[in-house]
Image (cartoon, grey):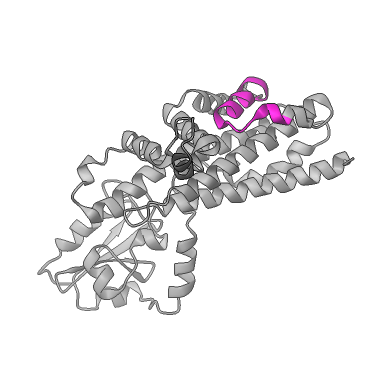
Amino acid sequence: MSTDLERFGCLLTELETSHKLIVAGFGTLQEIDMANDFYHLPHQLLASGLERLMKCYISLAYEDANGSFPDMNYMRTLGHDLTNLLAKITDEFYGGKSRRLVQAEYDFITTDHELAGCVRILSLFGKFGRYYNLDIVAGSPHSPIDPSSEWEALESTIVDPTPYIGDMEAMHNDYYPRVHSRIIAKLERLVRAIALQFTIGDHPDSEGRLSQTSVVYSDFRNLRDEQLGTRDYRRSVHILEQREKAKWTKRTDEEIKSSGWPTKEISKDDFEGEWPFRADKIVVELRDNLFCIANIEGYAFALNGSAKSHLKMPFPHEAGVAILGKSVGPFTDIAFKLKDTES
């Protein structure tokens, strides 16, 4: 028979696992684009991560209220349906609503239709969709669920793809990052809403276990509204940084502006429109009236396909120096307007 301390240790490990799965799920979702439609991986990671997070939180809140961790029979009744698990949390274990922040989070996770759509599809994936193709082969008596098709349909309701059809570069650089930013923002806020319960859910926390485990999700708990959907979770960004750093040449602003190519310095404060870069200032550069470049903190990044393919520069979004879901298109236009001007 396991002791309560051993159970708590296992629960802490499971909570840490859930965090890693969710972060990896967001990263693989951000990798989806025209060349990569492998939705199965982010669905697998997110469905598993969210289920584990919800069950860990329910177990901690249950133990705090009842003096012991839930037994196997109770855990079996929870099932694998994320929609039902979330309802269990909001109906029985969501406290602290006297605080405006907590009430606002509660209102969001119980009424937001886009979030409900995401959770529903991930639930269907967890229950029926993991083996969609094999179910078709075996002639399953249940109506097979194709999570990828359901998810793509959801994406089209969140961001209309029609304006991007026929422009492959815009689909790759604008549509997919924009829609995934919206979806991840919704799911990040769901995770934040649960994470807040560990600290300001007004639970007695007589054993201090909620507060002890709260550190696992402190990064999500501390997300501000304006940060939702802006984090870059992709492993490829870190790999690119490690691989390319030795090859990148850093130039000062003076060196960039005296290179002989037309340039224009643009700051976040002076720019009218949505600022997509993580830095507050860039220098736009146009080479040979064809290659559009954004110089960010001294490093050059491609603003169009020609610069990407010919000069072998990464796009700002690929390198994580621009926020996914925010377009750099206006800066490509600015670069082309530098044609035939003096630097």
Q: Decide whether residue 226 is among the magenta residues.
A: no
**Residue 293 found in image quarter:** bottom left
Which x, y percent locates residue 107? 52, 23
For image coordinates 50% across by 43% down, the residue present is 131
Task: Identify which residue, 255 or 5, lies in the foreground.
Answer: 5
Which x, y percent locates residue 172? 30, 54
Name above or below for residue 209 compared with residue 275: above
Residue 306 appears in view: yes
Q: Please state if 190 lies on the left or on the right of 217 as rendered.
A: left
For image coordinates 26% across by 71% down, the residue present is 309
Q: Quadrant of the C terminus?
A: bottom left
Q: Quadrant of the N terminus?
A: top right
Name above or below for residue 333 compared with residue 125: below
Which x, y percent locates residue 238? 49, 64
Residue placed farthest to the left in the image?
Answer: 340
Q: Which residues are magenta?
A: 75-94
